[in-house]
Image (tube, coloured by chain):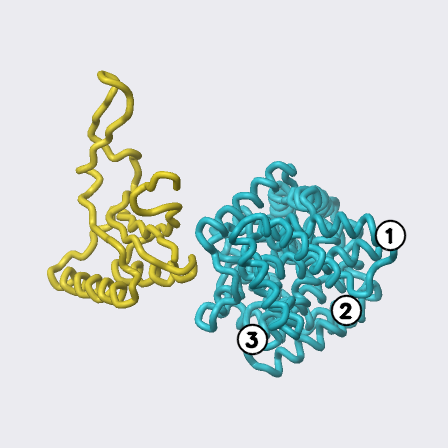
Amino acid sequence: MNQYLLSVYDGGGSGPGTPEEMHAFMGRVIALEEEMDAAGVFVFGGALHSADAATVVRGGTGLDKVTTDGPFVEAKEHIGGFYVINADDLDAALVWAEKVVEAIDRDIEVRPFRATGRVQAGS
Amino acid sequence: MEDVERAFRDAHGRAVATLVRLFGDIGLAEDAVQDAFVTAMDRWPRDGVPENPAGWIVTTARNRAVDVVRRNARGRELTREIAADQQRRASDPADDDQLRLIFTCCHPALRDEHQVALTLRLVAGLGLSELASAFLVSEETMAKRLVRAKYKIKAAQIPYRVPGDAELPGRLRAVLSVLYLVYNAGDESGQVHLRTEAVRLTRLLVRLMPAEPEIVGLLALMLLGEARRPARGDDGIGVLLKDQDRSLWDHALIDEGQTLVLSCLRRRQLGPFQLQAAIQALHCAAAKYEDTDWTAIVRFYDRLLKAMPTPVVGLNRAIAVAETQGPAAGLALLDGLTDELDGYHLLHAARGRMLNSLGRRTDAAEAFTRAAALARTEPARLFLQQQAESTRGPIG
């Protein structure tokens, strides 16, 4: 079993506007996540605050350490949320990615995990 | 020696495909097949080509790969599985293996140029230097492409299987467009071995998936194009369809292509490749240019435009319409395409011909000059430049 990161990108679109749209949107997401759970696919997921809330920490020693307001990269689109899913292979992951795109009407990047969980000594 | 080379080509795709299935590792499969070829190079010229060269390569490569993996625990497990697999499979599984490999190489998660490079390397067995010169890049660049594509297959776990019914239409389209891209690359650059490989792989696919009419359509399209190449001049673009000596056409290929088109028409599931092949079959059916059934051609273009509404299809339809309704009607259609195709030399070449037929020679010369400036190859540029000059020349 492999794990994939499904990054959901916010393109500066307005998103669900009216309360009715918001309600329908939530309904679709809840149904999708229940389907993921039932299939044993859902590992973790979350929605992020906007990139305006991001802070960047850069390495260095002592006084060289720099903390700034940020997103890390200035871009038109930022990650707005993500899922971590279990899937046998890329094709299986893409089927779920399509369902996510359909439910939330946002573009998605699918990326395989090289490793997950805590780093073990000797691995 | 030619026997050896042909046997290599045929065996390469089968051998790599079989080993990828058995070992699940493209790198290992390639190395083992390469080793088997080196052994064959040494032995075959001396002892003669074995009765079943492809089978010999597969067996030798498999033994070689077993030697490599036996050195670790997973390898010992694998060798047991492989022994069991050999007993289970009485029939020749190489066909299924090749089909799986083609679908892996043409997975839409890989970028187009990587799909093309992988397919030609793994399935067709083209060498690195051949690939590099075919696509006008350095061997280093081509090697990087292959490495990146193989890395992605492994890291993202792109599966090694023929897609299920639900995904098949889309995935098959990706495979066919790779094959067509290979053919067109060989057509534009005049590299016959690319066209030969494209035809060979498409024939293979027809045999492996006989129920898919679009594959047959693509094969027919290639064959009908190939049939007329001898009449297109040495560089392949110097003689327009109108001026071609039709006795130079390869009529055996035309017969085969037309038979395939007929079988498609009978099946009545006409997709874009079959429609394009049908149009080419109509061109090939005319003994001379004046006999061309343009009305039927326009009808097929109408259907093609519905199935594949791209500006290039619109351009070709406009050219056919100019033949049935006159150059003014064609020109009006081209005007609707200039936004999207302004950078495409064939739009301006078609404009030039239509303007010329209307007697607007200055405008025509200007269009040909613009076409020449946009041409992608030197022979095409020279040809269009010539058209511009002869249009501009003194009225005879």
Neighbour tally class for label 2: few under 14, some 14-19, many 20 plus, Cα within 10 Å: some
Q: Tell me the colour chain B is drawn in.
A: cyan
Q: Which x, y percent locates residue B110?
A: 50, 52
Between marks 3 and 2, how big is the CA–CA gap? 21 Å
Q: Are the residues under badges 1 and 3 in a single subunit?
A: yes
Which chain, by letter, is yellow?
A
Marked residue nearer the N-terminal end (2 or 1):
1
Q: Amino acid at mark 2?
A: Leu
Q: Is residue B155 among what the camera can see?
A: yes
Q: Is residue A88 left or right of residue B186?
A: left
Q: Which SS class for mark 2?
A: helix
Locate residue B276, reporting x and y percent.
61, 68
Identify residue for label 3.
B270
Label disc, if present, on residue B45 of the rendered structure: 1
Looking at the picture, how far across and down is residue B369, in whole percent?
A: 64, 43
Closer to the camera, B380 or B356? B380
Left or right: where A7 falls relative to B213: left
Residue type marked 1: Pro
Given residues B293 and A19, the one toward you in this image is A19
- Are the residues flagged by discs 3 and 2 in contact, CB closer than 8 Å? no
Q: Point out which mark residue B253 bears.
A: 2
**Splitting the image into 4 quarters, where does residue B295 fall?**
bottom right
Q: Would you call the spot at circle 1 few (<14 residues within 10 Å), some (14-19), or many (20 or more)?
A: few
Which chain letter matches label 2? B
SS at mark 3 in the image: loop
**Which chain does the numbered disc 3 sit on?**
B
Q: Nearer the viewer, mark 2 or mark 1?
A: 1
- Classify 10 Å Cα crowding around label 3: few (below 14), some (14-19), many (20 and above): many
CA gap between label 1 and label 3 equals: 48 Å
Sequence-first tag of 1 and 3: 1
Instruction: Name which residue lies at 35% across and 52% down.
Output: A4
First in sequence: mark 3 vs mark 2: 2
